[in-house]
Amino acid sequence: MLEQDARRYTWAVTDGREMLRALRESAGLSQQELANRLVEAELKLDQAHVQKIESGAIKRPTAPTLDAILTVGLNVPYRIRIDVLAAFGYRLQWELPTDQEIELERSLSTEELTRTIWPSYLLDYAQRIWGWNRLFPRLLVNTADDPRNAGYLGLTVLDILFNPVVGTNRQIANAESFGPVIVAWFKLMTKPYWQEPWFHEFMTRAKTWPGFFAMWNQIPEGPQVLLTESPVIPVEIHVPGLASPLRFRTIHVPLAFDPRFAILHMVPLSVETQAICAAWAAEDTAG
């Protein structure tokens, strides 16, 4: 059972036994208590095996064994799983975050989102949106407290840009130039996960969006498009009631605690856009 997912890992040698011991002790567990948790989950890892890993008698425990200790035995956050496995020389392929991990990141990112003075949102590596600041809904013609905003939770950025059911695709003023760049970025970032069920589910849905599948097929695999295009291709967004589209440069900032998540900042790229964002922020503060 512990070996069946071994293909998700790659190997290089370092020593992480002190990290495992510190995590166990900080959890208030003896080696036997940790082993009991593993046995209860029907994993064949007894106290002697745990002791051999921590002492270094087993110098190269398998990655699935380590991951079982970290998840089933110690229930550590994803960031710590990455660090401990890396200390033993393994790289853990990213997995979609759980509901609990999403809620944790929503909580941890609140302060950064709140203090930004332009539209910003939280997303995971599958480009699903999980939170935003109070300026982001204004781009979608909603107020910050509009209950309809909840409908955007879990949608991908590509849904916002291409999905006619969502309806926001009509607001992208420069879809012909910005669309291919976003699709190229998504294609490059998700390539390691093309065999995952969540990716197949996404593509099945995306194939129904007008023009998307043709654009996907026209864009070559690899970073060529991103390297050959202009360094800055802004997104231009029509907001009803405004005379001209707002122009933003998007900046992707991974989160240190869990690199599967990032905050995407939509930084104003014109004086007019900056003024509108400042006015929205002032209105929100006054309200």
Image (cartoon, grey):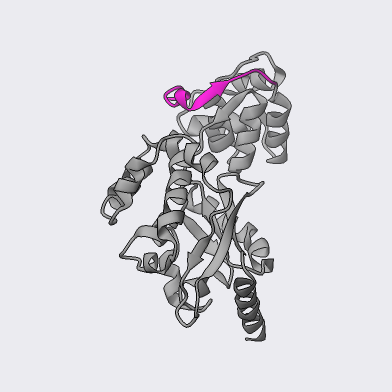
Q: In which quarter of the image is the C terminus?
A: bottom right
Question: Residue at (73%, 27%) from the top-left corner?
Answer: 18
Camera-side residue of 249 and 59? 249
Question: Residue at (50%, 29%) from the top-left corner?
Answer: 39
Residue 10 within the segment the image draws in magenta: yes
Camera-side residue of 14 and 251? 251
Q: Where is residue 101 in the image (x, y as percent from the top left)?
A: 54, 50
Question: Residue at (64%, 57%) from the top-left corner?
Answer: 108
Q: Position of residue 163 (x, y in %)?
A: 34, 60
Q: Does residue 10 appear left or right of residue 13 in this picture?
A: left
Q: Residue furthest bottom?
A: 287
Residue 257 within the segment the image draws in magenta: no
Question: Residue at (64%, 38%) from the top-left corner?
Answer: 80
Q: In which quarter of the image is the N terminus?
A: top left
Q: In which quarter of the image is residue 174?
A: bottom left
Camera-side residue of 61 and 194? 194
Q: In this view, does 246 lie above or below 191?
A: below
Q: Give the range drawn in magenta.
A: 1-14
Q: In this view, does 222 lie above or below 241?
A: above
Q: In which quarter of the image is residue 177?
A: bottom left
